[in-house]
Image: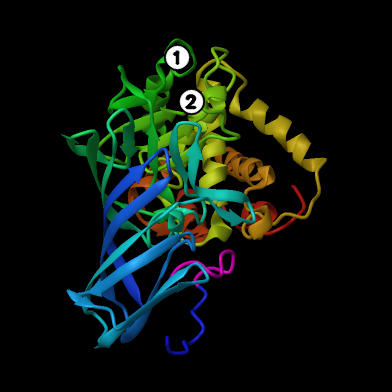
């Protein structure tokens, strides 16, 4: 019988059931096998952590679709464990003091499926012939046990075995690729601190190509049939990278950037740490989706490296990535950022005036108004500071909080250093009032 537990602390009211207090994870090591045809995942997760308080019980986020067969902590079997309510509950043999190192090994398996959320299905998803993981905001637990909250960043080692005809893409550097009979074992290392929702797994019949002309390595994984359209639609990515490095500061990851184009259509593109995922419908030879390409690349700075500690501050991800779309348009010969800002401002004024940018609420955190109003906030700030100070601020922001987590007050506090005038009226109008200024 599992002992009655104290109600878990709510780490983020937007996702009250997500995240786990009492410990901090520094590294995940996943050793997995996946069979595409039958959607069967099995293996183990080794989680390196440290206790933040005295503990005899702890939890990890884990989908109810996955079954745990064994749990050990610091080399000893757990006293008890059970899975319920999207959590793996673990009781230790004895209490651990604060500051004690933890090595938790979980053996598990099952047929992973997306988690149902306010925003639709998220997480591990089967494609027609392969897999993608779209973890934002709470889908990581659909395929591995974790502390699933953006404030909980860690390093990763992802080793996965699957049929050799498939290519596996995961975060970080491919450090080993070993063929074993009809299987290939792929091993990736992601040393930079990464939020769980940004950890991804992509499996498909993909070929690889490299895009030249950027200051960092840019690679693409895509079906052969899409290669010609890709070379037209995505060919300006090196230029984008050069522009964003100039405007936002150094690219934040050592191993470069990978774009995956699935053989299936996707409703929207998706970001992951060092990776962006597009559907075949975004690669159609028309170059009609270039703003999405810029948006997802910008997330490597805004969202992936500098990450909101709480989901209420998601404008720090989406407003910045949306503004990067406008900056790319201006640079590449399209409408200027000012023209785009004026057009979107008119549209926002015609929409419901009930969204608070600094706290939009969980149901509206992916509302397009968050994206556009966030970008307009930055454009208003740029107009007040001037270009030199505005872009110096962005570089300071991405450098100071590289691979860290932030709240809105961190940005407004930093911006104050770049202005000779009080910025409070601007923040009150754009962040803390519902009416569009």
- Secondary structure type for disc 1: helix
Q: From what the image shows, is residue 192 above or below residue 8?
A: above
In this rendering, the count of numbered labels is 2
Would you name the residue on which mark 1 appears? 225
Measuring 47% from the left and 49% from the top, which residue is drawn there? 135
Magenta span: 11-19
Would you name the residue on which mark 2 appears? 263
Q: Nearer the viewer, residue 267 or 142?
A: 142
- Secondary structure type for disc 2: loop
| Cβ atoms under marks 2 and 1 closer than 8 Å | yes
Q: From what the image shows, is residue 31 above or below residue 132?
A: below
Figure quadrant of residue 82: bottom left
Residue 349 pos. (x, y %):
79, 42
Q: Nearer the viewer, residue 267 or 89?
A: 89
* In the displayed structure image, the side of residue 11 where residue 82 appears, left or right: left
* In the displayed structure image, the side of residue 206 where residue 156 appears, left or right: left
The N terminus, quarter of image = bottom left
What label does residue 206 carry, if any?
none
Residue 49 pos. (x, y %):
26, 69
Q: Categorize mark 2 by other alpha carbons within 10 Å: few (<14), some (14-19), many (20+).
A: many
Q: Nearer the viewer, residue 385 or 180?
A: 180
Figure quadrant of residue 209: top left
Q: Is residue 144 visible?
A: yes
């Amino acid at each position: 019988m599992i002992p009655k537990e104290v109600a878990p602390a709510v780490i983020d009211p937007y996702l009250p059931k997500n995240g786990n207090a009492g410990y901090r994870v520094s590294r995940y090591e996943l050793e997995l096998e996946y069979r595409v045809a039958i959607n069967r995942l099995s293996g183990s997760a080794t989680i390196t952590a440290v206790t933040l308080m005295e503990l005899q019980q702890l939890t990890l986020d884990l989908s109810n679709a996955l079954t745990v067969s064994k749990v050990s902590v610091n080399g000893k079997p757990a006293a008890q464990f059970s899975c319920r309510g999207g959590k793996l509950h673990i009781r230790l043999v004895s209490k651990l003091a604060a500051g004690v190192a933890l090595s938790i090994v979980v053996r598990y398996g099952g047929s992973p499926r997306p988690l149902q959320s306010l925003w639709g299905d998220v997480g591990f998803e089967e494609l027609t012939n392969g897999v993608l993981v779209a973890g934002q905001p709470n889908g990581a637990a659909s395929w591995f046990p974790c502390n699933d909250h953006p404030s909980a960043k860690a390093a990763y080692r992802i080793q996965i075995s699957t049929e050799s005809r498939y290519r596996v893409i995961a975060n970080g550097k491919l450090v080993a690729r070993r063929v074993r009979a009809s299987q290939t074992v792929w091993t990736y290392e992601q040393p930079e601190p990464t939020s769980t929702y940004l950890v991804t797994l992509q499996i498909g019949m993909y070929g690889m190509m490299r895009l030249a002309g950027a200051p960092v390595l840019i690679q693409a994984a895509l079906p052969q049939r899409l290669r010609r359209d890709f070379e037209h639609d995505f060919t300006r990515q090196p230029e984008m990278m050069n522009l964003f490095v100039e405007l936002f500061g150094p690219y934040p990851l050592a191993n470069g950037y990978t774009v995956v184009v699935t053989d299936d259509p996707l409703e929207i593109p998706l970001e992951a740490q060092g990776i962006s995922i597009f559907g075949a419908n975004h690669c159609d030879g028309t170059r009609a989706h270039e703003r999405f390409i810029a948006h997802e690349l910008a997330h490597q700075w805004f969202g992936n490296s500098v990450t909101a500690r709480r989901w209420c501050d998601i404008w720090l991800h989406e407003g910045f990535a949306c503004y990067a779309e406008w900056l790319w348009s201006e640079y590449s010969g399209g409408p200027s950022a000012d023209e785009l800002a004026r057009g979107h401002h008119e549209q926002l004024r015609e929409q419901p005036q009930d969204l608070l940018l600094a706290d939009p609420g969980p149901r509206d955190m992916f509302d397009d108004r968050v994206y556009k109003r966030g970008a307009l906030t930055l454009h208003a700030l740029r107009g007040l500071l001037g270009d030199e100070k505005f872009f110096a601020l962005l570089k300071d922001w991405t450098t100071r909080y590289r691979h860290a987590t932030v709240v809105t007050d961190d940005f407004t506090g930093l911006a104050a250093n770049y202005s000779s005038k009080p910025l409070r009226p601007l923040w009150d109008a754009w962040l803390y009032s519902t009416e569009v200024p």
